[in-house]
């Protein structure tokens, strides 16, 4: 299945697109058994998997390692590999090299890059030209959090909103097949969605986008201290996993585990 046609068709039929992040093979196997439309191996893994305070430290080799693991767990799902900070900013040639390496080594379906600077537009054009599908990412672009004033909502003021909206049109013109819109007002998300033909995938961008994406650890409630307004937790893994580990610990220490059922004769 071709990711560009699949996304195009979904928008044409006005069918919402579901996307979820994933970083490892075990969760990818679970996702493979669901109807989720696509998996983003996001550089958010730098935060939720590696424990960093931002996505900045993530390397291309780490993205490739995790994308390969996800691909092994969900070989039939559409998989997008995030290109990490500085792997595509230094020159067009380096950007092409990084995207090509991700595609060749992981067999993913597309790459995602952030922002809409002149450089990113040119890079998108060149990547698409050589056959690498590109997903854009506008609004809160976490790789630029140091210059955006943190991980906070973008596009509240008219000129900032206009810049993001123009960025979406420019990315479409450069050949991106979809755009992630992160942390922007619902009205702006809807306006952008109606102004372009490629699908928008929102995270904290309201109900008007063509699809939604959430970070898997967030929607599963792994971190009990993380409650952003845009997030809905569909499980409370923090307490489920904590309780299982406490039970195991208690049973080891009271010699309840291993029991008759768990031993070899
Ligand atoms: O890295 C990531 O997981 C992302 C999503 C939040 C869209 O970019």
Image (cartoon, rainbow, N blue to C red):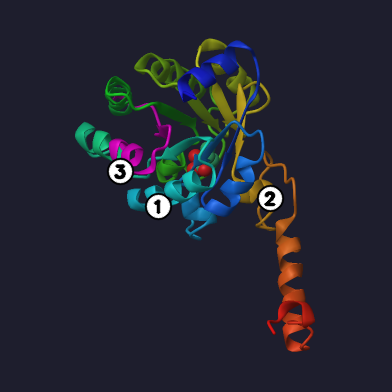
Ranked by sequence position, the earlier of labels 1 and 3 is 1
Q: Quadrant of residue 202?
A: top right
Of badges 2 and 1, the one in the foreground is: 1
Element type at marker 1?
Answer: helix
Of residue 264 and residue 250, the one placed in the foreground of this image is: 264
Estimate the x, y position of residue 22 in percent, counting from the top left: 55, 46
Of residue 181 and residue 150, the one placed in the foreground of this image is: 181
Confirm or deny contact between disc 1 and disc 3 (CB under 8 A).
no
Q: Residue at x 50, y 54 (%)?
A: 47
Question: Which residue appears farthest toward the bottom when viewing the image?
Answer: 254
Of badges 1 and 3, the one in the foreground is: 1
Estimate the x, y position of residue 265 in percent, counting from the top left: 70, 85
Q: Quadrant of residue 130?
A: top left
Look at mark 3 in the image and give the residue it sits on: 87
Q: Is 240 drawn above or below residue 145 in the view shown?
A: below
Ranked by sequence position, the earlier of labels 3 and 2 is 3
């Amino acid at each position: 299945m071709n990711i560009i046609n699949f996304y195009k068709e979904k928008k044409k039929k006005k069918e919402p697109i579901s996307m979820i992040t994933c970083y490892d093979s075990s969760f990818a196997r679970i996702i493979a058994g669901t109807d989720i439309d696509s998996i983003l191996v996001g550089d958010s893994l730098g935060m939720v998997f590696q424990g960093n305070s931002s996505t900045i430290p993530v390397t291309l080799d780490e993205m490739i390692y995790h994308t390969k693991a996800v691909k092994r767990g969900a070989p039939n799902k559409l998989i997008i590999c995030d290109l990490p900070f500085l792997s595509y900013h230094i020159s067009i040639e380096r950007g092409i090299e990084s995207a090509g390496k991700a595609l060749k080594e992981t067999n993913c379906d597309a790459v995602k890059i952030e922002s809409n600077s002149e450089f990113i537009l040119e890079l998108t054009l060149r990547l698409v030209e050589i056959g690498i599908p590109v997903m854009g990412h506008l609004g809160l672009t976490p790789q630029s959090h140091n210059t955006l004033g943190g991980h906070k909502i973008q596009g509240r003021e008219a000129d900032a909103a206009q810049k993001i909206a123009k960025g979406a049109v420019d990315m479409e013109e450069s050949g991106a097949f979809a755009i992630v819109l992160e942390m922007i007002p619902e009205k702006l998300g809807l306006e952008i969605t109606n102004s372009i033909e490629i699908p928008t995938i929102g995270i904290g961008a309201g109900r008007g986008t063509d699809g939604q994406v959430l970070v898997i650890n967030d929607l599963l409630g792994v971190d009990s201290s993380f409650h952003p307004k845009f997030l809905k937790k569909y499980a409370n893994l923090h307490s489920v996993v904590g309780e299982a580990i406490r039970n195991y610990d208690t049973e080891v220490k009271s010699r309840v585990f291993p029991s008759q059922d768990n031993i070899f004769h």
